Amino acid sequence: MFLDWLGALPGASAQGMIWGIMAIGVYLTYRILDLADLTVDGSICTGGAVCAVLVTSGVDVWVAMLAAFAAGLLCGLITGVLHTFMGIPPILAGILTQLMLWSINLKIMGKANIALPIRKYELLLAQIKTLQSILVLLAFVAVVVAILYWFFGTELGTSLRATGNNQSMSRAQGINTDFTKILGLVLSNGIVAFSGALLAQYQGFADINMGRGAIVIGLAAVIIGEAVVSRISSNFAVRLCGVILGGVIYYFVYQTVIFLGLDADLLKMLSAIVVAVFLAVPYWKKRFFAKPHRTKGGENHA
Amino acid sequence: MLEIKNLTKTFNPGTVNEKVALRDLNLTLRDGDFVTVIGGNGAGKSTLLNAIAGVWKPDCGSVIIDGVDITSMPEYKRAKFLGRVFQDPMLGTAADMQIDENLALAKRRGKRRGLAWGIRAAERAEYRQLLSTLDLGLETRLTSKVGLLSGGQRQAVTLLMASLNQPKLLLLDEHTAALDPKTAAKVLEITDRIVNESQLTTLMITHNMKDAIAHGNRLIMMHEGRIIIDVEGEEKKKLTVEQLLDLFSRASGKEFANDRAMLS
């Protein structure tokens, strides 16, 4: 029993890293832009669908993953336009895109499910090749973290962070906040769709339901990751690695509760409850445990 | 420099909450004018500044800066002409970003933001020097998050940000109103110094009549969306609060009413 559990950990790590990459996409919108974007439930499936369709029709897997990434960028663009140009609140904009993507994903795949077995196709990763998958994923994680670390240090990246922090200040400093919000949503969904392409290869199929509840897993990974690394360092790259770690921890816990004999049907409910509680903690802290605030003045506080 | 012609703005038109905030307002500022703006509740002071900053479009009229008509230019585009400090100290800075990052954001106001590094080493030295002129000890805290600073410190940093790159017009919207009196005095002193050093054309709303008289070279008083008093030079210097209140009641036929006004 214990050995079975131990044997499942490498697989859980691989799956955790895939969802960790997805969670980095969620981190970009939820933490940096301060928008809760529900597009991801659809765009992760779009990524998987595009990758599966292309690979099964003989396209090189690298090209297929690039196409999946590009498709994700478009998904983000839809939500961005709905939100900025059409003035729809971000949550609703994401839900609308998500619903559109349900149809689009079915049209892309032509059916609800496409098998993508590694014995038939040249894939980068697969469940039965756990070690190879982990190494490939580590490389992708390194690349994604490095690119984002660089990007958010640039003028453009800084203006994205400013937008998430304070929109009126950003506009007063000449930042086109509509543009930065669209850019953030585009980038986020590109990453999410890319993780969908990885997931389809790893699990050996793309499925119309593969994105259901993705936002909750993403949020869980972000929250767990922050809880783990926030005391170690506030460095941006460390935070991103924390999100990946959050995904891995999530899947370790997932495997563990399955081994403990929990009904797998209840897992989504459990995830949602855990995320709800974690989201409530900062609010409860403020409401019930805040120390009375005293306004300070005087020489040192001009 | 700044020309405002026939500016009119009505909020919630056609509803019970209809409010005419600006009525056919005209104002011309010369280069280097430092104008203080006072007025009662709902006189249209902030509305005037927001119209210049482009928070929304006016119903009619035009705003012209240095010959460029900016009336329908979006807020973020006209930002290159303007430096702004808000009443709420939280509004002017990005709390989760470092002091130097905030200054670097302001330094790039009106410029294209590309993939160059967001802040260069040479800039840090410049910012350290600028911060030291504030005399608040911030020059040693370049990498502190702005959210850790007090309200007064944040307003001082926002002032620095607003004055970077020599804006054509500095807009101060009661930027000391949320501070305690001692801190407010310090921030006003910094304001005076920055405006004088860089010869910035400035519009400063204040609720303190004494401050309005003591600072700047020109004073305007607003009432019901219009400018009813406009004094400058020697005449302004010699004004007293009593005379100002008297001028107000003669021009408007009413007693001066502002919940926050400080008359003494």
Image (tube, grey):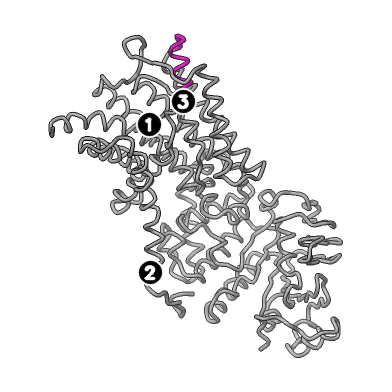
Percent position (x, y) of residue B33?
A: 74, 68
- Residue B204 appears left or right of A14: right
Q: Report the residue that reaches farthest toward the bottom.
A: B242
The foreground one among B99 and B15 is B15
Residue ID for mark 3: A208
Query: How many numbered marks are there?
Result: 3
Which secondary structure lies at badge 3? loop
Residue A143: assigned label:
1
Instruction: Give the quarter of the figure containing the C terminus of chain B.
Output: bottom right
Which secondary structure lies at badge 2? loop
Task: Select label 1 or label 3 by which is in front.
Answer: 3
The foreground one among A146 and A263 is A263
- Residue A224 appears left or right of B259: left
Distance from the alpha carbon under mark 3 to that under mark 2: 45 Å
Residue ID for mark 2: A290
The chain that hosts pointer 1 is A
Please check whether the numbered discs 1 and 2 fall on a single chain: yes
**Could you tell me the amino acid type at mark 2?**
Ala
Which secondary structure lies at badge 1? helix
The chain that hosts pointer 2 is A
**Could you tell me the amino acid type at mark 3?**
Ile
**Is residue B3 visible to the viewer in this orientation of the structure?**
no
Contact (CB < 8 A) between labels 3 and 2? no
Instruction: Give the quarter of the figure containing the N terminus of chain B.
Output: bottom right
**Could you tell me the amino acid type at mark 1?**
Val
The chain that hosts pointer 3 is A
